[in-house]
Amino acid sequence: MVKTQMLLAAEGEHNPIVPEPAEIVVGLIAFGLLLFVLWKYAIPRFEKIYAERSERIEGGIAKAEAAQAEAQRTLEQYKAQLAEARAEAARIRDDARAEGQQILEEMRAQAQAESERIVSQGQAQLAHQRAQIVAELRAELGRHAVDLASRVVGESLEDEARRRGTVDRFLEELEATSAPASSKAAKS
């Protein structure tokens, strides 16, 4: 029974699964119009937007590459300037060392000259003092020698010429005996 009712319903009523021919024609015309509108207006606009985006992306890539190339050039310039600055610093350091060495040599020469001047001045002063001391000792030694000789001889040796001759002869003998002794001391 159920089967028969279905068959009757299928013959008399319209089947919702199968469309009617008028609907198919209207659907095809609407689809054609939609396809025409999309083809005429929407697709060119999509193509235009796609092309603009592609150009922007490619332009952005080109700009990025240009920026990267500029950054690379700037980096190379920076490295060159840094190397130049290091070379300049090394040159300045070498110049300073050379100048310092020259100043040091000049100061050594000045110190050496000053030292030689002081030594020669000291030697001259010592020679002068030695001569003065020798003269004083000669005079004193002469007096003592005359006094001793007067005591030994028993007469006065106050005559100036005699006294000088005696003193000179005594000093010469004294120097002659002390010269070999001082040369022996200097050798040892």
Image (cartoon, rainbow, N blue to C red):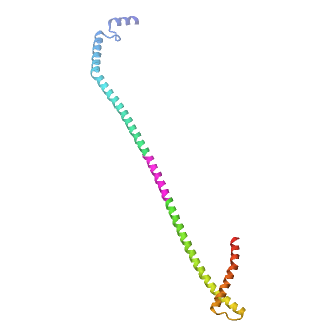
Quarter of the picture holding the N terminus: top left
Is residue 55 or residue 6 the one in the foreground?
A: 55
Residue at 38% over, 39% down: 70
x, y percentage for residue 102? 49, 60
Residue at 72% over, 92% down: 153
Please identify the quarter of the rendering in which residue 171 is found. Answer: bottom right
Please identify the quarter of the rendering in which residue 40 is found. Answer: top left
Q: Is residue 8 above or below residue 74?
A: above
Q: Which residues are magenta?
A: 81-100
Quarter of the picture holding the C terminus: bottom right
Residue at 61% over, 84% down: 135
Number of labelled discs?
0
Left or right of 95, for residue 161: right
x, y percentage for residue 90? 47, 51
Specify whether residue 96 is painted magenta: yes
Residue at 58% over, 74% down: 123
Left or right of 6, for residue 118: right
